[in-house]
Image: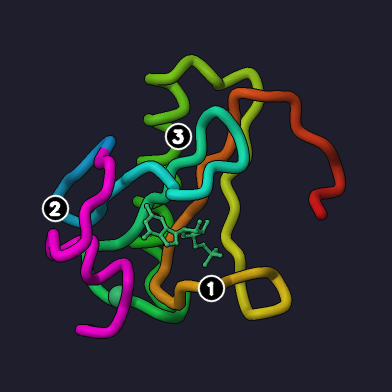
Amino acid sequence: MTDCLFCRIVKGEIPAKKVYEDEHSLAFEDIDPQAPTHVLVVSKKHVAQKEDAELIGRLHLVAAEIGRQRGIEDGYRTVLNVGPKSGQSVFHIHVHLIGGRPMKWPPG
Ligand code: 5GP
Ligand code: ZN
């Protein structure tokens, strides 16, 4: 989708600090990090809804691998914001990997 921010990052039209890439997914640093690690793992294809169970699983596995590489397995969050009330602003499926600091519960 030409007007989708994450599609444009996937296509290289908008620069991002990439941390991982494979056939299905791309991970890059969030522009407004909420923790020492704040990585977005996005699907390469434009998927707005969570209709693709395999893809969701892949994105979570990529997030877990990045968490391992960064040594933050003692506590991190993988977050899917869903809908405007959750704070979702980009309607292209993505998992937030947030960690590297103590996390509070419940999240805001
Ligand atoms: P959402 O709120 O939809 O769950 O997550 C969107 C995320 O994209 C936000 O955390 C926001 O900081 C991040 N973001 C917005 N614009 C850009 C950008 O141009 N580059 C990068 N790397 N992240 C962005
Ligand atoms: Zn998109």
Q: Nearer the viewer, residue 104 or 16?
A: 16
User: What scheme was used to colour the molecule?
Assistant: rainbow
* Residue type beneath disc 2: Glu
Measuring from the top left, give residue 46's x and y in whole percent: 28, 76
Q: Which residue is mark 1?
A: 89
Q: Which residue is mark 2?
A: 23
Q: Which residues are magenta?
A: 1-18
Q: Which residue is mark 3?
A: 64
Q: Specify the quadrant of the image occupied by residue 92.
A: bottom left
Q: Is residue 38 above or below residue 92?
A: above
Residue density around tag 1, few if under 14, some if 14–19, many if 20 or more, within 10 Å: few
Q: CA distance from mark 3 to mark 2?
A: 17 Å
Label 3 residue SS = helix
Q: CA distance from mark 2 to mark 1?
A: 25 Å
Q: Which mark is residue 45?
A: none
Pointer 2 or 1: first along the chain: 2
Q: Nearer the viewer, residue 34 or 23?
A: 34
Label 2 residue SS = loop
Measuring from the top left, give residue 72's x and y in whole percent: 55, 20
Q: Residue at x 26, y 49 (%)?
A: 16
Marks 3 & 2, CB-CB < 8 Å contact: no
Q: Residue at x 38, y 42 (%)?
A: 29
Looking at mark 3, is its residue's CB closer than 8 Å to ligand 1? no
Confirm whether the magenta stretch covers residue 74.
no
Measuring from the top left, give residue 7's x and y in whole percent: 24, 71
Looking at mark 1, is its residue's CB closer than 8 Å to ligand 1? yes
Q: CA distance from mark 1 to mark 3?
A: 23 Å
Pointer 1 or 3: first along the chain: 3
